[in-house]
Amino acid sequence: HGFYAPRVFFSSPGDLGPDRDAAYDAVSEVNEQLGMPLRILLTSIGLRSDDQIIAYRGAVSENVRASHYFVQIFEDDWGPNHLFRKVFLTALDCRDDDSQPMRDVVAFLKDAPRENDPAILALRSELESLAGARLIRYRNPTELKEKLIGVCGEWVEALRLELPVTAGNPG
């Protein structure tokens, strides 16, 4: 097909279905508006439910290791057995390893202004303190989509500058 197709792994524990859908919509918009004319197609992969990380933990980790970008959406927990934390840390390790394809890891943290549960506050604090992690706060799925369009646009622009100039990618 002649497209460069880097993989974007999406991860989101809990009841963030509308947020996850907004994230996939953002990638689709960036592909249509920016990527396709340059023959760059961000390929979305990831988990649709918490059960998948339990049943296919090894496959999930391998998919993370094979991805170029990682987007984690959080609000109030690390998912079952804290497995989404492990996946997130795997993505950070891959980003820091030059032999891996991972280029960027971004965590989106949904605002929870009335939250007072100590375990949830600890998760949020840990995310804020992780060295090297890019953390972007958002209020609702619409804002998540807008912010992710910006992030994906950055990725496409960086790829445009790195890929060889061809008829499909004018550089």
Image (cartoon, grey):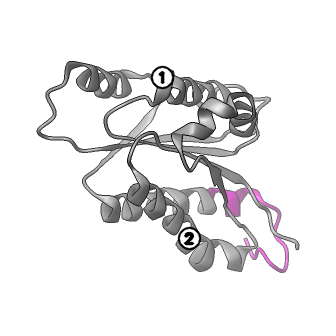
Given residues 115 and 149, the one toward you in this image is 115
Asked whether 159 falls inside the magenta stretch, the response is yes
Whether residue 94 is visible = yes
Q: Is residue 23 above or below residue 3?
A: above
Image quadrant for the N terminus? bottom right
The Cα–Cα distance between marks 2 and 1, rounded to whole angstroms, is 31 Å
Q: Amino acid at mark 1?
A: His
Q: Point out the frontmost of discs 2 and 1.
A: 1
**Residue 104 on the magenta span:** no
Mark 2, Cα crowd under 10 Å, few <14 / some 14-19 / many 20+, is many
Residue for badge 2: 30
Magenta part of the protein: which range?
Answer: 158-171
Instruction: Residue 47 in the image: state x and y as whole percent.
Output: 59, 46
Local secondary structure at mark 2: helix
| Picture residue at 78% right of the left edge, 60% below the top | 163
Q: How many marks?
A: 2
* 142 left or right, relative to 6: left
Amino acid on which disc 2 is placed: Val
Residue ID at (69%, 58%):
159
- The residue located at (62%, 26%) in the rendering is 90
Dot placed on the residue nearer the N-terminal end, 2 or 1:
2
Whether 100 is drawn above or below 30: the answer is above
In the rendered image, the quadrant that contains the C terminus is bottom right
Residue 95 visible to an observer of this rendering? no
Q: Which mark is residue 82?
A: 1
Q: Position of residue 97 (x, y in %)?
A: 71, 25
